[in-house]
Amino acid sequence: MTILHPDQTAIDDAAHAWLCCPDPDRPFFYFSGAAGTGKTEVLAKLARERPHSVMCAFAGKSASVLRARTGLEVTTVHSAILQFNGIVDDDEGRKQPSFFDKELDLGGQVVFLDEC
């Protein structure tokens, strides 16, 4: 069980309220704060409560740090939506990475994004 500071509890409560009844005019919920205020701890708690959620970070190093801090499965945003397809030659003969869209159907899943 995660014990939260009162400020974290307020954010957690607001997030639960939004997750329960999302506003169609605002299809996302975000919170911010200074370094060391426990944002990642709140995010990890929310993700643990939703085992089918997707937890992402912008960069591989951030995903690695977040994975180590939370013990949760974490991926980069790009890895969540794209699949590496190999190296191909472009029109000018230069080697380029090739990706294809995973065409994810998140179908009501929650995506958590941490800047970590």
Image (cartoon, rainbow, N blue to C red):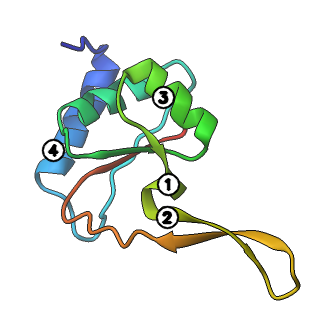
Identity of the residue drawn at 26% across and 69% down: 105
* Residue type indicated by callout 4: Ala
Query: Going 21% across and 63% down the picture, which residue do you hit?
Result: 23
Disc 3 residue type (three-letter)? Leu
Q: x, y percentage for residue 61?
A: 62, 34
Left or right of 86, for residue 19: left
The foreground one among 75 and 100 is: 100
Residue type at tag 2: Leu
Kind of residue sitting beneath label 1: Ser
Q: Hey, which residue is sitting farthest bottom in the picture?
A: 91
User: Going 81% across and 88% down the picture, which residue do you hit?
Assistant: 91
Q: Residue 76's x, y, as percent?
A: 51, 47
Disc number lying in front (2 or 3): 2
Give the labeled residue for mark 4.
Answer: 17
- CA separation in Å, label 4 and label 2: 31 Å
Is residue 75 visible to the viewer in this orientation of the structure?
Answer: yes
- Marking on residue 66: 3
Circles 2 and 1, Cβ within 8 Å, touching? The answer is yes
Return the residue at label 2.
82
**SS for dot 2:** strand
Please tell me whether mark 3 sits on a helix, a strand or a loop.
helix
Q: Is 86 situated left or right of 77 in this image?
A: right
Report the residue marked by disc 1. 79
Q: Is disc 2 surrounded by few (<14), some (14 to 19) or many (20+) residues within 10 Å?
A: some
How much space separates mark 2 and mark 3, taking CA atoms?
20 Å
